[in-house]
Image (cartoon, coloured by chain):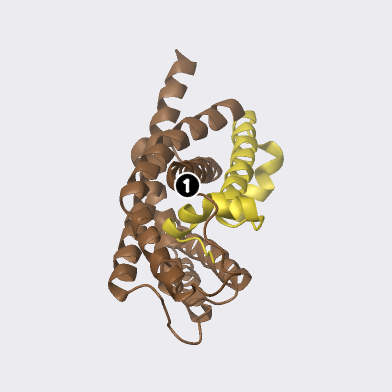
Chain colours: A yellow, B brown
Amino acid sequence: MNANSSVNSAALAPSRLEALKAAAVALILGLGLVWLAGFAYPESVHDTAHDTRHALSFPCH
Amino acid sequence: MIARVLTSGLIAGLVAGLAVAALQHFTTTPLILAAEVYETAQHAHDAADAGPVFSGIGRTAATSVATIAVSIGYALILLAAMLFSGDAITPRRAALWGACAFAATGLATALGLAPQLPGMAETELAARQIWWIATAVSTGAGLFALLRFDSAAAKIVGVALIIAPQFFAPQPAAPESTAPAELAAHFAASSLAVQAISWALAGALVGLVWKFMSREQEA
């Protein structure tokens, strides 16, 4: 399946290409938000998200 | 398309996040506050161990903001996963994706690093974060291989991806805790339930909003 999709990538339907672009934007933004709330080091971010990090079992100290 | 994706993620995440924040307020947060009393009593002489910056309503607000941010993130990640894999985006399917995401980021990670209350023995933070992320990604990929491909090889790779990270979980030298075991057990169970609800709700709502917005656009 992977081989097929790479061969066909040049000929992707415009709607599929648009969906993939939107998915990439959503993934980056989504991971960014989870990173900020769940993992980021700055003290102010940690203090704000402290209880959420514990509650949603992101590693915390 | 991008506008529809972002709007769906934002609305679904906001609503899911508010509901989860309310749930946390009555389930996990009281246990965290109780554990902090034990932790402070134990380390009363330790001046460097400063307490939380926020208290009262400010703390509730801060926690709610962080929880909403996580929920919007979850909704966007689920949308991205369904778009990448070419799935039809419906509330039921999105909730199932959420259930798998919970298995990867909640259940699998909790096997190695159980949900922790303040005052429990821990290892270096960076190592735990790296293991957590690696386990979530590996388990997610393993579940995808198991559920999406029929070949025996894919099934074997899937199972291996799910099991392998468990051998590398960072463990503290001794399982110490200032919080009573009963409190910690209650917290671990509550945390897993809250996580499951966060993912399922983010999924179901993002599927619902997506369906609604698609209908609007076609009309």
| Image spot of residue B213 (x, y percent) | 46, 23
Q: Does any portion of residue B7 appear in the rendered image?
A: yes
| On-image quarter of the N terminus of chain B | top right
Measuring from the top left, give residue B139's x and y in whole percent. Answer: 48, 65
Which residue in the structure is indicated by mark 1?
B59
The answer to which quarter of the image holds residue A38 is bottom right
A16 left or right of B208 in image:
right
Which residue corresponds to the image point at 50% horizontal and 70% vertical from the top-left?
Answer: B161
The single residue placed furthest to the front in the displayed view is B45
Residue B71 is situated, as x and y percent measured from the top left of the image, at 47, 43
In the rendered structure, the answer to whether residue B197 lies left or right of residue B69 reads left
Q: Residue furthest bottom?
A: B173
> Callout 1 environment at 10 Å: few (<14), some (14 to 19), or many (20+)?
some
Residue farthest toward the top in the current orientation of the protein: B219
Q: What is the quadrant of the C terminus of chain B in the image?
A: top left
Q: Nearer the viewer, residue A48 or B88?
A: A48
Type of the residue with mark 1: Arg
Q: Nearer the viewer, residue B95 or B24?
A: B24
Asked if residue A1 can be seen in this view, the reply is no
Q: Nearer the viewer, residue A42 or B35?
A: B35
Q: Secondary structure at mark 1?
A: helix
Residue depicted at 42% across the width and 68% down the height: B110
Q: Is residue B126 above or below residue B11?
A: below
Where on the picture, by quarter, is residue B48?
A: bottom right
Figure label count: 1
**Residue found 43% across the figure and 81% down from its top:** B176
B196 or B173: nearer the eye? B173
Residue B88 appears in which quarter of the rendering? top left
Indicate the chain on which mark 1 is placed: B
Residue B129: x and y in percent read: 58, 66
